[in-house]
Amino acid sequence: MTILIVVAFIIGYLMIALEHPLHIDKAASAILTGVVCWVALVIGLDAMPLTATAEGAEAIRDAHFLDHHLLEHLGEIGSILFFLLGAMTIVELVDAHDGFRIITDRITTENRVRLLWILSLVSFFMSAALDNLTTAIVMSALIRKLVTKKEDVWLLAGFVIIAANAGGAWSPIGDITTIMLWIGGQVTAGNIVMKVFLPSLASILIPLIVASFFLKGNVFKPDEAEEEKESLTTLGQRNLIFGLGVGALLFVPIFKNLTHLPPFMGILLGLGTLWLVTEILHKGKDWEIRKELSVTAVLQRIDTPSILFFLGILLAVASLQTSGHLALLARTLDNTFGNIYVINILIGLLSSIVDNVPLVAAAMGMYPMSQFPVDHTFWELLAYCAGTGGSVLIIGSAAGVAAMGVLKIDFIWYLKRISLYALVGYFAGVGVYFLLNGAG
């Protein structure tokens, strides 16, 4: 019975959601879930739903059909994974050259409200150019240098999470879910920026305005600045690598429009260029220094488990799509709610509890392009809701989990002090989108 796929998926999903209590890395659970779902699909061939494919039930009972569709899904998944791998390597290379000091060294204010606005807006735009995970890590490191009181550290980090997720939602390269929609062809780069920018901006501005009425005074900076290790790069080298790195990321949408090649080709072009430049730049230095600044060393710092997590969960969702369960879920949602705003709002709120990657992957599988064509209101709103809804709980986004790990933020504290701000901002953005675009 193909119900085995659903059972396997739910069990795997629960293991992913309960990663910390179970002390089992979510990547391990995702990989197992992906494989087990496809095994369950093979076992349940004879009970396959008639809606699984346009070719009908007879075609899907053929093992060659499964091979074909597995490889087809793997091609789509691979393009996302290679893009992420290239982008993460570029960001790590810039960080290895201390390139982000261009931003961090310029923030000196001690006023609590002013600092909150500065860090939030920097995070908003940095996330659009890089990604929300990297932004959260960089800004968390910065916050620790700027303030000492734990309450201030966590407060600033909470708004950084909201801002990073909001900034990633409107950029085709800022959030994994928006990347998925862009690479999948559901949205185009220019349109997603134009249509989702203002709702995303509202989702951080409204919480900032509200918080400004309640926050007063100055933050406490460290009594003695921590002694910084001697930089391995010069100011000119830092600026060069920062400019090339950010430029490579920003060039990807342009590359796609010019060549019509997949985005991962553009990111690999940028990575190859940076790799060549850094090799030439440091060829005269001692081997120990060259090794620290090389792409080879940077690749060892890449978060490989995250890549494997995406592989596993996307394979699992692909099995649900192939079996026809996602089409059935789509009809159920349409019959129950029948409104794309309600559906997307629910998806966004659900993404604060579980990871937004499989939710968006499921939506992409549930709703064909024939129903919602490129740049339809549904896809634009999905990009916004899935990107920003995860801010409501600290475990609901990669940015939140990263900041939680770096700064040891308490889940309950975030729920009491930040979640309401995030929720108000979330619905404010939906309201702005509705005012600008109507029912769609």
Image: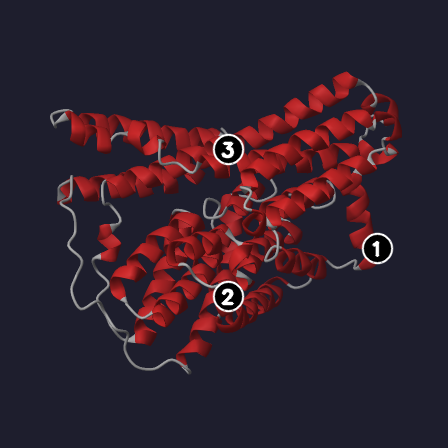
What whole-number distance in Å separates the C-alpha atoms at marks 1 and 2? 30 Å
The reply to whether dot 1 and dot 2 touch (C-beta < 8 Å) is no
Q: Secondary structure at mark 3?
A: helix
- Give the residue type at disc 1: Asn
Q: Nearer the viewer, residue 144 or 103?
A: 144
Q: Secondary structure at mark 2?
A: helix
Front position in the image: 172 or 420: 420
Vertical relation: 429 (above or below) 275: below
Q: Earlier in the sequence, mark 2 or mark 3?
A: 3
Classify the position of the C terminus by image quarter. bottom right
Q: Which residue is mark 3?
A: 81
Looking at the image, which is closer to me, 344 or 28?
Answer: 28
Residue 238 versus residue 380 in the image, above or below: above
Relative to residue 147, is residue 175 drawn left or right? right
Which residue position is annotated with label 1? 335
Which numbered disc covers residue 203?
2
Q: CA distance from mark 2 to mark 3?
A: 28 Å
Q: Is residue 282 visible?
A: no
Locate residue 336, reporting x and y percent: 82, 58
- Category of crowding for the residue at label 3, using alpha-carbon neighbours closer than 10 angstroms: few (below 14), some (14–19), many (at least 20): some
**Disc 1 packing (10 Å; few <14; some 14–19; many ≥20):** few
- Secondary structure under tag 1 reads helix
Question: In the image, what residue occupies the spot 47% across and 56% down?
Answer: 400
Q: Farthest residue in the top direction? A: 64
The extreme front residue here reads 22
**Between marks 3 and 1, how big is the CA–CA gap?**
34 Å
Residue type (three-letter) at the residue carrying disc 2: Ser
Q: Residue at x 63, y 33 (%)?
A: 32
Q: Nearer the viewer, residue 124 or 232?
A: 232
